[in-house]
Amino acid sequence: MLEKLAILLAVAGGLNWGLVGFLGLDAVELCLGGAVTIPGRVAYTLAAMGGVGCLPLLFRSRKGR
């Protein structure tokens, strides 16, 4: 359950960074006011926590192989 939540948050953060890179559009800034507001900081923090939460998935071995 927590792994799926971490992946979801990391994907949302990745999509936002993709929008920033390709279109110069920051969805968090557009929707929540960016890093200068509390909701924006929460959104950025959750995306970062999702990325950190996905780190163990890189090092987990597959069962049966």
Image: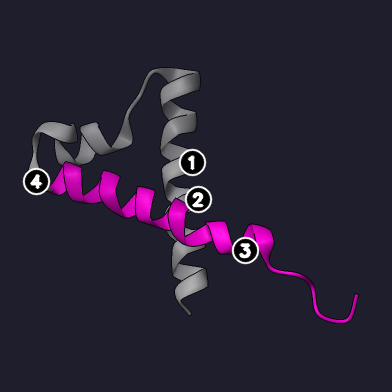
Expressed as whole percent of the image width and height from the top left, the position of residue 26 reads 32, 29
Three-letter amino acid code of the residue under disc 4: Ile
Who's the residue at 62% across and 63% down the image?
Answer: 57
Question: Based on the displayed image, in which of its 4 quarters is residue 30 positioned?
Answer: top left
Distance of mark 2 from mark 1, alpha carbons?
5 Å
Disc on res. 2: none
Label 1 near label 4: C-beta < 8 Å? no
Q: Which of marks 3 and 2 is nearer the N terminus?
A: 2
**Residue holding disc 2:** 11
Disc nearest the viewer among 3 and 4: 3
Q: What stretch is highlighted in magenta?
A: 39-65
- Disc 3 to disc 4, C-alpha distance: 30 Å
Pointer 3: what residue? 57
Quadrant of residue 61 in the image? Answer: bottom right
Instruction: Give the alpha-carbon distance from disc 3 to disc 1, as whole Å.
Output: 17 Å
Q: Which of marks 3 and 2 is in front?
A: 3
Q: What residue type is labelled 2?
A: Val
Please tell me whether mark 3 sits on a helix, a strand or a loop: helix
Q: Pointer 1: what residue?
A: 14
Mark 4 and mark 1 lie on one chain; the one further toward the N terminus is 1
- Distance from disc 3 to disc 2, alpha carbons, whole Å, reads 14 Å
Asked if the residue under mark 2 is in contact with the one under mark 3, i.e. CB atoms within 8 Å, the reply is no
User: Mark 1 and mark 2 in contact (Cβ < 8 Å)?
Assistant: yes
Q: Is 9 covered by the magenta stretch?
A: no
Decide if residue 37 is on the left or right side of residue 34.
left
Q: What element carries label 4?
A: helix
Label whose residue precedes the other's in the sequence (3 or 1): 1
Q: Quadrant of residue 32?
A: top left
Residue at the right extreme of this rendering: 65
Q: Determine the residue positioned at 48% across, 40% down.
A: 15
- Label 4 belongs to which residue? 38
Q: Is the magenta stretch mostly helix, strand or loop?
A: helix
